[in-house]
Image (cartoon, grey):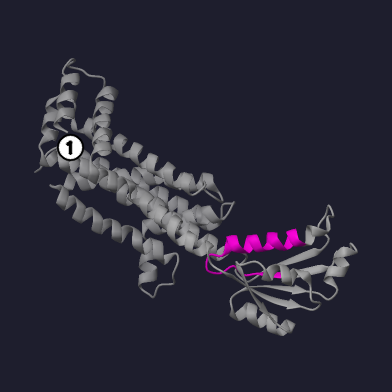
Amino acid sequence: MTTGIESLTGQTKKSTRPHHGRVVWAIARKDLAEIATNTQFIVTGLLPVILFLLYRLLIVSVNNSSILDIAVYDLGNSQLVAAMQEDPTLELHIVASEAALQEQINEGPMSGVQIPANFDADVAAGLKPELKIWLNPERGMSSETLQWQHAIETEIMQLGQQTLPAQIERIDLENGAFSSDLALNSFLLIITLTMIFFISGANLVALLITEEKEKQMGVVLINSPANPYHVVLGKALAGSVSIIIVLVIVVLLNGGLTGNWPLALLYLVIALPVSLSISILTGSLAQSSKQCNSWLGLVMILFLVPAWFSTLLELPEPFNTIFSVMPTHFLVSGLDDALNNSGVSEANSLNLTVWLAFMVVIVGITFWRLRQSPKSVVASH
């Protein structure tokens, strides 16, 4: 890091009135090099990616290897049953009545199919008989359920007709097909996205500030043509680049964003100045990296965790009321709504307004802190 400071000082000494943009970029470039070569910074920055991959590679692979339970009520010894029995990913539960079928579906929980009498003969005759199936993919079984539906349709199409020779009625049970799986996926994605901003990103910028204060490199910087505001902008730029890179990696690994993705991106755009402001405030107040880690780690846990779980669980009072007015509650609720719906609900309008207002407040506090004590980001008290 010393080499980077000396290089920056040498560059800016060439002119007594350096170009502000060049000074800021020189500081940002030095910090980006530090982030890319420092093991602690690399681990901190990539922590959300690591956790996201662990979920995708471990938990999803376990779910995909699961057996799908199907309750079957066959009134006419259909060949569909024989075909499903040959599929190793299915476990059939043959029932003798419609009442037993409904009991299995409701208590399982499992998907179900009711095959009418003479189904095979009607299909062969082109009469398009009705096939009724119930979709209940609990426990993250959406992909298996889709494969099962496709297998049924493929088996029926064996007659070689150009159109599907049966009328398949799909009945989505109470919470809708795949809703529990989608809700879990979006919940884990939201955890990852917020970690990028408020754990990894915030820590990176705050540690960059406190490390230079510990090594007294900030004093060297402000003895060059750079001033504390250049330092803040340079570190904010380096932090922004790092956050955006990690964010893009996670979104690509997720296969993009679902629902109203422009609205979801807007929430994340607003989250960037909030994250940077918190990290700059922490860096200006903390006198060491250890102090920074302790303070910021505790604050971020209190800042994020209640918002994560208050949207998933019904908490007892007064915790439910307390957590429902936290700023991150509106961020998490807004992201959850945007990722799972294509439109903009009235609740999302409120979430966006509150989150935007919080951004204005936290950025204003940061400006006030820098105006009152600009050297707090480059030197210890």
Main SS type for the magenta part?
helix
Left or right: where does residue 295 sit relative to residue 167?
Answer: left
Element class at badge 1: helix
Q: Is residue 293 above or below residue 370?
A: below
Q: Quadrant of the N terminus?
A: top left
Disc 1 marks which residue?
374
Which residue corresponds to the image point at 33% horizontal and 50% vertical from the top-left?
A: 47
Would you call the spot at circle 1 few (<14 residues within 10 Å), some (14-19), or many (20 or more)? Answer: some
Measured as percent of width and height from the top left, residue 146 is found at 64, 60
Task: Identify which residue is drawn at 38% across, 56% down.
Answer: 328
Task: Please tell me in which quadrant of the rendered image residue 206 appears.
Answer: top left
Residue type for callout 1: Pro
> Residue 130 versus residue 86: which sits nearer the camera?
86
User: Who is closer to the viewer here, 51 or 212?
Assistant: 51
Residue 340: x percent and y percent? Answer: 55, 56
Residue 179 in view here: yes
Q: Residue at x 17, y 16 (%)?
A: 16
**Residue beneath the point at 39% across and 49% down:** 357
* Residues drawn in magenta: 133-155
In the image, 65 versus 300, the foreground residue is 65
Q: Name the image quarter holding residue 216.
A: top left
